[in-house]
Image: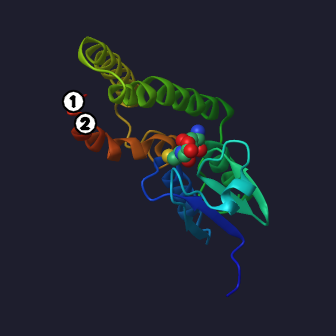
């Protein structure tokens, strides 16, 4: 079988891998998907390609590996310039998208995941912080169809998966964030 130019190492339950799949799909890029068995049975190929973080996702383009999902999204957008554009064109809008991604990553995702490592009063504090962060994010996108405005863009890929996983996290942790 002919080897595809792009290979993505992911894992079915990973939102970070999902981001990259969405970017490849929006661009219409064909890729080979390798589902890794995490956390204890990573393939030797993955460890060889990413000896630094040893995490998924990893993409390989023309034999060259890349780690970190958001780095991959920008690389994909820069490399396949034709077709769908993921990053905003305007430098200020690009900077804003990166700012809100950082906010969502640090304040919404990381804080929410704290419900799994806390209990009692400490967990209530985490929940309160998460609720405030989501309120701030919601205010920033009020009136927009997507995070990036009227079309799907960088922030939707970066953060959209979390909306899907949130009810699952709530059920597992037995808490309500909304
Ligand atoms: N910041 C990284 C996070 C990647 C990450 O945390 N991947 C997890 C799966 S969702 C992983 O590979 N965990 C295995 C491990 O830590 O050994 C990215 O955005 O790509």
Q: Is mark 1 on a helix, strand or loop?
A: loop
Nearer to us in this view, 77 or 55:
55
Q: Is residue 132 left or right of residue 80?
A: left
From the viewer's perspective, is residue 29 above or below residue 79? below
Q: Nearer the N terminus, badge 1 or badge 2? A: 2
Instruction: State the residue at coordinates (57%, 67%).
Output: 34
Residue 17 placement (x, y as % from top left): 53, 53
Q: Quadrant of residue 1?
A: bottom right
Disc 1, disc 2: CB below 8 Å? yes
| Mark 1 C-beta to ligand 1 under 8 Å | no
Ligand 1 shows up in the quarter that is: top right
> Up-down: is 23 above or below 121?
below
Front residue of this view, candidates 50 and 67: 50
Camera-side residue of 51 and 22: 51
Is 76 situated left or right of 149 in this image?
A: right
- Residue 56 visible, this angle: yes
Horizontally, residue 50 falls left or right of residue 27, namely right
* 13 up-or-down from 140: above or below: below
Q: Where is residue 140 in the image (x, y as percent from the top left)?
A: 41, 26
Cα separation, mark 1 vs mark 2, equals 5 Å
Q: Residue 170 carries which label?
A: 2
Q: What element carries label 2?
A: helix
Mark sitting on residue 74: none
Q: Among all residues in the image, which is located at the extreme front?
A: 40
How would you rate the neighbour count of disc 1 (Cα within 10 Å): few for under 14, some for 14-19, many for 20 or more? Answer: some
Which residue lies under the disc numbered 1? 175
**Quarter holding residue 94:** top right
Q: Residue at x 31, y 40 (%)?
A: 166
The quadrant holding residue 60 is bottom right
């Amino acid at each position: 079988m002919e080897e595809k130019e792009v290979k993505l190492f992911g894992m079915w339950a990973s939102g970070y891998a999902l981001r990259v799949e969405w970017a490849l799909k929006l661009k219409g890029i064909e890729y080979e998907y390798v589902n890794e068995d995490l956390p204890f049975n990573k393939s030797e190929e993955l460890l060889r390609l990413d000896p630094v973080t040893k995490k998924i996702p990893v993409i390989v383009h023309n034999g060259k590996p890349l780690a970190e999902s958001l780095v991959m999204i920008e690389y994909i957008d820069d490399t396949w310039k034709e077709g769908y554009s993921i990053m905003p064109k305007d430098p200020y809008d690009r900077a804003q998208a990166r700012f809100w991604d950082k906010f969502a990553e640090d304040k919404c995702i990381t804080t929410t995941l704290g419900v799994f490592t806390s209990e009692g009063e400490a967990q209530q504090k985490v929940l309160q912080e998460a609720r405030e962060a989501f309120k701030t994010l919601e205010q920033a996108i009020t009136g927009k169809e997507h995070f990036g405005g009227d079309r799907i863009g960088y922030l939707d890929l970066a953060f959209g998966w979390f909306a899907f996983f949130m009810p699952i996290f709530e059920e597992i942790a037995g808490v309500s964030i909304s």
